[in-house]
Image (cartoon, rainbow, N blue to C red):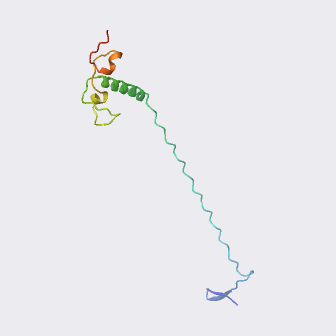
Amino acid sequence: MPSKIIYHNACFVYFCETEFAFKKKKKKKKKKKKKKKKKKKKKKKKKKNNNNNNNNNNNNNNKNNNNNSNNKNKVDRRSSPLVNLNRARGPRVTHVSQDDRWTQGKQTNSQT
C-alpha cells in the first residue's frame, strides 16, 4: 500500500517505503565547529617602588621628632584618641636622682 502519492508531470508516481524503492538520501550532519577558548590574560604584577621603604623610614623619623617636639596639642593614638600626650606621660618631673624617684622632685636629704 503506497504511503505517499507524489504528483509529477501529471503522472501518478507511487512511492513505496520499501528498501528497493526510491531511497531517501541521508542528510549529512554538519559538524559543529568547536569554539576556541580564549586565553586568560595574566595580570601584570605592579612593581613595588623602593621609595616606599625610604618613605616609611622618613615617616618614622618624623614621628619620633614630633614626639620629642613641644607639640602640646598632639594626640597619642596608642592609648586613646582623646588623651593628650602630656597627660599620657604623667606629671612633668625635673631631673631627679634615682633615690628620689618616688618623691617626684621634692628635695630630700639624700646627701646626709
Tell me: 53 left or right of 85. right
Which residue corresponds to the image point at 24% horizontal and 30% vertical from the top-left? 73
Residue 25: x, y in percent? 68, 74
Residue 7: x, y in percent? 61, 87
Tell me: 2 left or right of 59. right
Residue 68: x, y in percent? 31, 22
Residue 22: x, y in percent? 70, 80
Along the viewing direction, whichever of 22 and 110 lies nearer the viewer: 110
In terms of image quadrants, where is residue 108? Answer: top left
Along the viewing direction, whichever of 60 and 87 lies nearer the viewer: 87
Say if 6 sits above or below 25 in the image.
below
Residue at the farthest top position:
112
Residue at the farthest right position:
20
Which residue corresponds to the image point at 60% horizontal and 62% vertical from the top-left? 32
Along the viewing direction, whichever of 10 and 59 lies nearer the viewer: 59
Tell me: 106 left or right of 38. left
Quarter of the picture containing the C terminus is: top left
Which residue corresponds to the image point at 57% horizontal and 56% vertical from the top-left? 35
In terms of image quadrants, where is residue 61? Answer: top left
In terms of image quadrants, where is residue 59? Answer: top left
Say if 104 sits above or below 88 in the image.
above
